[in-house]
C-alpha cells in the first residue's frame, strides 16, 4: 500500500520539466540534498562557483608559499536570526535564545568550549593532533537594520525577526544580504546549509525548531531544543555553519546511520589531511572509538562535522579551521554589512506605512500618507517634518508638524485638483532641533487616476480532473501531470496575487502543485510534498499568509498559507493571458482530483468611468469611521459584490449580496486603521471603484 519512507515538508520533485529534486531525508544534515537541488538554479550555481573560485585561488596561493595558516586579523561576523513562526510576545526569550546560540558558536569555533577537556582522555589515539581554533567571532547585529521587514525590529535591539517569512519560505532573502543569517522553522529534519554559502546573496543556515540553542528554549513559540536530549546543545548549528564556511563531512557515506555502500576508499571524505578517513558517519556516543580506514588510525567521532550526539561533539581540527578562516576571511568578509555590531547613536527613524498612494486630479483634491516615527536609545529631541517633490501647485501639511516620542503622523498633499498627471517621489525629511540629526524617507504618489484593483478569476466548480497516480514506491517517480488553464482578459502590471486550490487526494504529501504565468516560463511551486499523510486541501496561498506547520494536530486542510515558493515572482508581469495550474503525483497508491482553483490578481487599473456607473449610486458618509452605506439601482439580476482594499492592494473585506433592483447595504470594516480605502462594487455588468476615507 503506502511506502514506508517519510516525506518531509521541504520535499521537492524531479519531473523532466520541473527543475528540482527530492530533498532532505531524515538524517542529521540536509546539506548534500540541498546543494543537489540548488545547483540546478543558474543564479545560485553562478554565485557558488564565483565564491569557490575565489577560495581556491587563495588556498592555492597559500600552498605555493608553503603556508597553510590564515594570516589575517580576527574577523567579526554579524549575525541575524529569524523566527518565521515565533510569537512577538516571546521577543525577550527569542532574543536570549539567539544570543545563547551565538555564545555556543563563539566557544566552539575558538576551542574555548568547556567540554573540550574530553580531548585529554582520547588524544593518545590521534598522535600529533590538537583541536583547532578559528580567527572568527560572532556578534549579534544591533544597528542599521533593514527597514520594513519586521516592524517590531527596532534600532539598537538585536537583529531578531519574529513572525516574518524569510525569503518567502526559501533559504535566501536579498533583504538580509550582508548578514550571517539563521532561519529557525519546522523543517521535519534538523538543519541544512549551502556548502560554501554567500553572504552577498542573503543565504542562510536553516535549522529546525528543535535544533537551535540550548536550555529550555521558548515554548510559547514552539522553539525548544531537542527534548530527546541528542541535539540540545546547539552543536547541530555548529555543524551546519561549518558547511556554510566550506567544510564537508568527515566521512565517505552520508546516509542515516552510515551508507551501506560506503567503504574505505569509496570517497574522499572531507579531503583534509588531519581528519582520518572513515567509511561512514557515526551516530550517538559510541563507547568504543571505531577504527579509521588507514592502519592504526581512529575515527574522529568527536569532530563537529560528524553525526554524533551534541554532548559527544567538541572539536574541529587545525586544518578545518584553516579552511574556515580562508573562506570567511577572503570570500565572505568583504560581503559583511559594516557597522552593524556597534549600538547606534541616539536618534530616530521615519518610515512610510502605505506608499504608494493613488490620486486623481480630476476628482481628488487631497492624498494622505501614513508614516511612523521611532526613536533610538531614548532620543527625545523635537523633530520637525518637511517634504519636497510633491506635484507643482500642491501643498503639504503634516499632522502633527513635529514629534519627540514614538508614534504615527500623516502627510496630506493638498490642492491636487488640476495638477499634472504622473508619478511623484516625495522625500520626507525629519530634522531634530538641537543636534540636527536628519533622516529621510521617500514615498510615491501615483497621481494618475488609477488604483490597485483586485479581481477574481476562477475555473468552473467541480472540474473533477483526475490526478494520475505516481509510480514511485520508495523514490519519487511522477505520473503524467494534470493541467488546467484560466484565461485572464485584463491587462495590468501585477502588484500581488493569491491562488485558491481545492484538491481531493489521499496523502497530499505525494503532490507538487505549480502555477505558471502566461509567458510560459515564470512559475511558482505553491505545494511541494507538504504534510505527508493528510487527505485533501482547500487552501488559499498568499505570501502574507501563515506558515504551513505540518504536525498531527495542525495539518492545514483549509485556510490561508504561505506557498512553498513566493508568488511575488509574478509581481510586475502583465496579468493578461492563460494561467496554468499543474499537479503531479510522485508516489503510487493514492489518487485524487482537482476540484477547482482561482486567482485573485491585484493590478493597477484606471478608475471607473462615470458613464459605466450604476444609477443613483452613492457611498455615505465619506469620510467615515469604518462604517458606511452603499446605495444604487441595478436591473442586471446578478448578485452585488463588494470588495474593499487598502491602498497597497490588500483586500480587507469581501461579500456578495442577493438584491432586487434597489440595493442599500451598510458595510462595517471592523476597526480598521484610519486612512484611504478603495471600495469596488460589481454586479457582473458594471463595476465602480470609489475612494473612502476612514478617520
Image (tube, grey):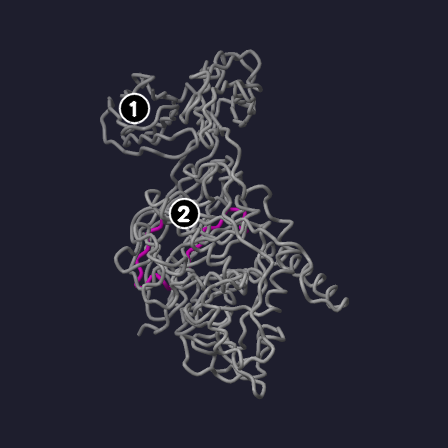
Read off the magenta span: 501-521
Res 528 → quadrant? bottom left
> Please, which residue is most extreme toward the right here?
65
Depth order, front residue of 201/466? 201
The C terminus - image quarter = top left
SS label for mark 1:
loop
Residue found at x 36% / y 34%: 651
Depth order, front residue of 600/46? 46
Residue 97 percent coordinates (x, y): 40, 52
Give the labeled residue for mark 2.
95
Give the labeled residue for mark 1.
626
The answer to whether one can see residue 105 in this image is yes
The answer to whether one can see residue 511 in this image is no
Residue found at x 58% / y 85%: 294
Is residue 502 shown above or below 511? above
User: What number is the disc on residue 242?
Assistant: none
Depth order, front residue of 611/248? 248
Badge 1 crowding class, 10 Å Cα cut-off, few under 14, some 14 to 19, many 20 or more, is: many
Amino acid at each position: 500500500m503506502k511506502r514506508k519512507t517519510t516525506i518531509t515538508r521541504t520535499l521537492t520533485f524531479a519531473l523532466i520539466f520541473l527543475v528540482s529534486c527530492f530533498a532532505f531525508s531524515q538524517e542529521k544534515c540536509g546539506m548534500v540534498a540541498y546543494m543537489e537541488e540548488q545547483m540546478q538554479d543558474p543564479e545560485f550555481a553562478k554565485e557558488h562557483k564565483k565564491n569557490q573560485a575565489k577560495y581556491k585561488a587563495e588556498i592555492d596561493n597559500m600552498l605555493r608559499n608553503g603556508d597553510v595558516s590564515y594570516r589575517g586579523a580576527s574577523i567579526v561576523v554579524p549575525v541575524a536570526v529569524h523566527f518565521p513562526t515565533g510569537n512577538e510576545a516571546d521577543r525577550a526569550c527569542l532574543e536570549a535564545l539567539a544570543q545563547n546560540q551565538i555564545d555556543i558558536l563563539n566557544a566552539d569555533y575558538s576551542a574555548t568550549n568547556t567540554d573540550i577537556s574530553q580531548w585529554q582522555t582520547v588524544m593518545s589515539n590521534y598522535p600529533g593532533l590538537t583541536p583547532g581554533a578559528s580567527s572568527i567571532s560572532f556578534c549579534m547585529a544591533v544597528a542599521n537594520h533593514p527597514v520594513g521587514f519586521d516592524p517590531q525590529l527596532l534600532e539598537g535591539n538585536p537583529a531578531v525577526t519574529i513572525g516574518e517569512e524569510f525569503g518567502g519560505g526559501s533559504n535566501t532573502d536579498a533583504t538580509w544580504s550582508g548578514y550571517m543569517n539563521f532561519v529557525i522553522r519546522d523543517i521535519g529534519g534538523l538543519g541544512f546549509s549551502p556548502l560554501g554559502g554567500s553572504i552577498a546573496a542573503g543565504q542562510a543556515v536553516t535549522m529546525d525548531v528543535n535544533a537551535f540553542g540550548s536550555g529550555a528554549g521558548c515554548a510559547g513559540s514552539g522553539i525548544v531544543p531537542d527534548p530527546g536530549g541528542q541535539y540540545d546543545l546547539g552543536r547541530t548549528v555548529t555543524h551546519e555553519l561549518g558547511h556554510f564556511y566550506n567544510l564537508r563531512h568527515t566521512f565517505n557515506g552520508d546516509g542515516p546511520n552510515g551508507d551501506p555502500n560506503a567503504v574505505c576508499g569509496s570517497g574522499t571524505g572531507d579531503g583534509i589531511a588531519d581528519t582520518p578517513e572513515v567509511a561512514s558517519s557515526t551516530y550517538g556516543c559510541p563507547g568504543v572509538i571505531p577504527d579509521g580506514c588507514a592502519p592504526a588510525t581512529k575515527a574522529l567521532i568527536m569532530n563537529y562535522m560528524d553525526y554524533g550526539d551534541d554532548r559527544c561533539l567538541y572539536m574541529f581540527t587545525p586544518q578545518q579551521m584553516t579552511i574556515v578562516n580562508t573562506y570567511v576571511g577572503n570570500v565572505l568578509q568583504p560581503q559583511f554589512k559594516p557597522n552593524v555590531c556597534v549600538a547606534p547613536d541616539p536618534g530616530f527613524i521615519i518610515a512610510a506605512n502605505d506608499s504608494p498612494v493613488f490620486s486623481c486630479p480630476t476628482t481628488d483634491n487631497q492624498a494622505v500618507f501614513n508614516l511612523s516615527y521611532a526613536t533610538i536609545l531614548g532620543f527625545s529631541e523635537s523633530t520637525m517634518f518637511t517634504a519636497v517633490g510633491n506635484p507643482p501647485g500642491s501643498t503639504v501639511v503634516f499632522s502633527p508638524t513635529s514629534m519627540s516620542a514614538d508614534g504615527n503622523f500623516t502627510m496630506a498633499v493638498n490642492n491636487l485638483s488640476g495638477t499634472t498627471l504622473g508619478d511623484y517621489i516625495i522625500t520626507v525629511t525629519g530634522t531634530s532641533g538641537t543636534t540636527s540629526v536628519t533622516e529621510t524617507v521617500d514615498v510615491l504618489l501615483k497621481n494618475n487616476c488609477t488604483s490597485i484593483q483586485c479581481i477574481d478569476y476562477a475555473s468552473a466548480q467541480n472540474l473533477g480532473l483526475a490526478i494520475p497516480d505516481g509510480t514511485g514506491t520508495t523514490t519519487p517517480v511522477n505520473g503524467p501531470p494534470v493541467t488546467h488553464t484560466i484565461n485572464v482578459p485584463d491587462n495590468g502590471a501585477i502588484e500581488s496575487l493569491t491562488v485558491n486550490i481545492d484538491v481531493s487526494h489521499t496523502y497530499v504529501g505525494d503532490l507538487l502543485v505549480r502555477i505558471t504565468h502566461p509567458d510560459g516560463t515564470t512559475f511558482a511551486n505553491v505545494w511541494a510534498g507538504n504534510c505527508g499523510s493528510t487527505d485533501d486541501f482547500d487552501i488559499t496561498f498568499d505570501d502574507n499568509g501563515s506558515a504551513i506547520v505540518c504536525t498531527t494536530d495542525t495539518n492545514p486542510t483549509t485556510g490561508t498559507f504561505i506557498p512553498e515558493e513566493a508568488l511575488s515572482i509574478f509581481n510586475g508581469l502583465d496579468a493578461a493571458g492563460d494561467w496554468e495550474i499543474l499537479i503531479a503525483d510522485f508516489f503510487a497508491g493514492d489518487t485524487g482530483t482537482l476540484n477547482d482553483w482561482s486567482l485573485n490578481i491585484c493590478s493597477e487599473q484606471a478608475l471607473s468611468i462615470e458613464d459605466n456607473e450604476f444609477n443613483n449610486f452613492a457611498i455615505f458618509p465619506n469620510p467615515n469611521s469604518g462604517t458606511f452605506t452603499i446605495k444604487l439601482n441595478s436591473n442586471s439580476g446578478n448578485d452585488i459584490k463588494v470588495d474593499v482594499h487598502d491602498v497597497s492592494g490588500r483586500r480587507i473585506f469581501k461579500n456578495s449580496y442577493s438584491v432586487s433592483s434597489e440595493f442599500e447595504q451598510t458595510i462595517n470594516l471592523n476597526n480598521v486603521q484610519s486612512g484611504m480605502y478603495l471600495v469596488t462594487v460589481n454586479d457582473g455588468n458594471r463595476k465602480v471603484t470609489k475612494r473612502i476615507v476612514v478617520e
